[in-house]
Image (cartoon, grey):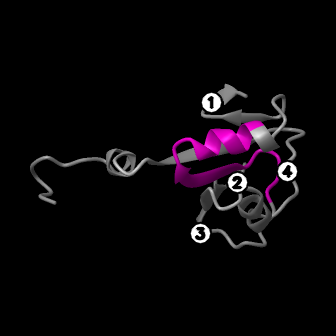
Amino acid sequence: MDQDNGRRSLGELLATVDIQVDELAITPGSPLAGISIGDIEVRSKGTFIVVALQRADGITTTHPNQSSLVVEGDTVIVMGHRSDIPKFVRSFVSKRNMRYRGASV
């Protein structure tokens, strides 16, 4: 791809193959709090992968260890098919306890 002409963002390139990167904010009482990155990926049934973990203190780890525990205040950054991430949120996460893309779900 020509870097100077017709440059596209990563988001645009991923959208062409129906992939997106999203954030799952772990709010107080979230059922994801206290479980591991590996468990989150297993519960997603292969619909997305965790690409980063941003801790409440702002420290971000890319490719977090599968045994890393998620705690309240963390943000889990995932990559997957555009329709699969909202399905995971609706099916697994309590609507009161998690925020997806900045909105309560």
- Seen at 70% across and 51% down, the residue is 57
Q: Nearer the viewer, mark 1 or mark 2?
A: 1
Q: Name which of mark 2 and mark 3 comes first in the sequence.
A: 2
Residue 81 lies within the magenta run: yes
Distance from Cα at disc 4 to Cα at disc 3: 19 Å
Q: Amino acid at mark 1?
A: Gly
Q: Tell me which corner region of the image, top left, top right, bottom left or bottom right, holds residue 3.
A: bottom left
Residue 102 lies within the magenta run: no
- Seen at 43% across and 47% down, the residue is 18
Distance from Cα at disc 3 to Cα at disc 1: 23 Å
Q: Which residue is mark 1?
A: 102
Q: Name which of mark 1 and mark 2 comes first in the sequence.
A: 2
Q: Name which of mark 2 and mark 4 comes first in the sequence.
A: 4
Q: Which residue is mark 3?
A: 63
Q: Tell me which corner region of the image, top left, top right, bottom left or bottom right, holds residue 69.
A: bottom right
Q: Can residue 52 be seen by looking at this rendering?
A: no
Q: Amino acid at mark 4?
A: Ala
Q: Nearer the viewer, mark 2 or mark 3?
A: 3
Q: Residue 91's x, y, as percent? A: 78, 40
* Closer-to-camera residue (75/13): 13
- Seen at 71% across and 45% down, the residue is 88
Q: Name which of mark 4 and mark 1 comes first in the sequence.
A: 4
- The numbered mark at residue 90 is none
| Label 3 neighbour load within 10 Å: few <14, some 14-19, many 20+ | few
Q: Tell me which corner region of the image, top left, top right, bottom left or bottom right, holds residue 90.
A: top right
- The numbered mark at residue 33 is 4
Instruction: Say if 38 sits above or below 79 in the image.
Output: below
Q: What secondary structure is found at the residue carrying circle 4?
A: loop
Q: What secondary structure is found at the residue carrying circle 2?
A: loop
| Range of magenta residues | 70-90
Count of labels shown?
Answer: 4
